[in-house]
Amino acid sequence: MRIHSSFAGGLIAATALLAACRDAQTEKDVTTRTANGEAATSMSGDSADKRGMALVRVVNAVPTQNTLIVRAGPNLQLTAAEFRKVTDYQPIDRNWVTFEISASADSGFAPLATNREMLTDGHRYTIVIIPDSANKFETRILRDEISDLKKELRQMLEATR
């Protein structure tokens, strides 16, 4: 039951942070606010689309890991994700991306989970890292379309009760 309650906690945090998002692709810059009022602004979806980029952020919902490192290929490390925190959106200029998750950012980076995804230019994505039943990591890549995502996250939370 411990995994389910930590998963639910991570989803609650993700829901609160995703609630500030509008659509996946926008005409204006997007400001995202955390529950304690911190704000981060990212480029508009249209601007990202013109530059051939998708925007990606990370949620760490693994209670046994204070910090997780995500790489989007061998040469692009995303901002470290603290437990129950969400990173700012970061641009990625590739469509096929292999995300690798590790607890260590040093030269001994060893992927503990890998997920290959296709991203669409101009859209926003959230990588949610959760524990699986074998005490390893599992990743879910969500396309940030809040009208559908908010309902889906609420249903997932209700299912864990």
Image: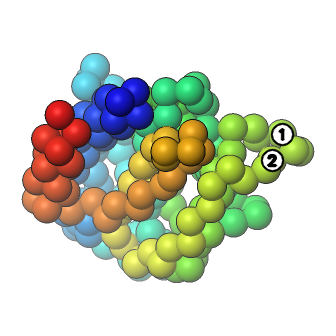
Residue 97, picture quadrant: bottom right
Give, as a three-letter code, the residue at label 2.
Answer: Phe
Few, some or many C-alpha atoms within 10 Å of disc 2 (few <14, some 14-19, many ≥20)?
A: some
SS at mark 2 in the image: loop
Checking the image for residue 34, the label placed there is none
Q: x, y (%) of residue 112? A: 68, 50
Q: Position of residue 3 (x, y in %)?
A: 41, 34
Which dot marks residue 109? 2
Q: Position of residue 74 (x, y in %)?
A: 76, 64
Tell me the residue at 27%/51% (across/down): 30
- Outermost right residue: 107
154 displayed left or right of 141? left
Instruction: Give amino acid for label 1.
Output: Asp
| 100 and 92: which is toward the camera | 100
Q: Are marks 2 and 1 in contact (CB under 8 Å)?
A: yes
> Which of the pair 115/107 is nearer the observer?
115
Identity of the residue drawn at 87% across and 44% down = 108
| Residue 77 seen in this snapshot | no
Q: CA distance from mark 2 to mark 1?
A: 6 Å
Number of on-image labels = 2
In the depicted view, which residue is nearer to us: 3 or 137? 3
> Which residue is identified by label 1?
106
State the residue at coordinates (34%, 69%): 123
Q: How is the image coloured?
A: rainbow
Where is 110 relative to 160, above or below?
below
Secondary-structure class at tag 1: loop
- Residue located 76% across and 40% down the image: 105
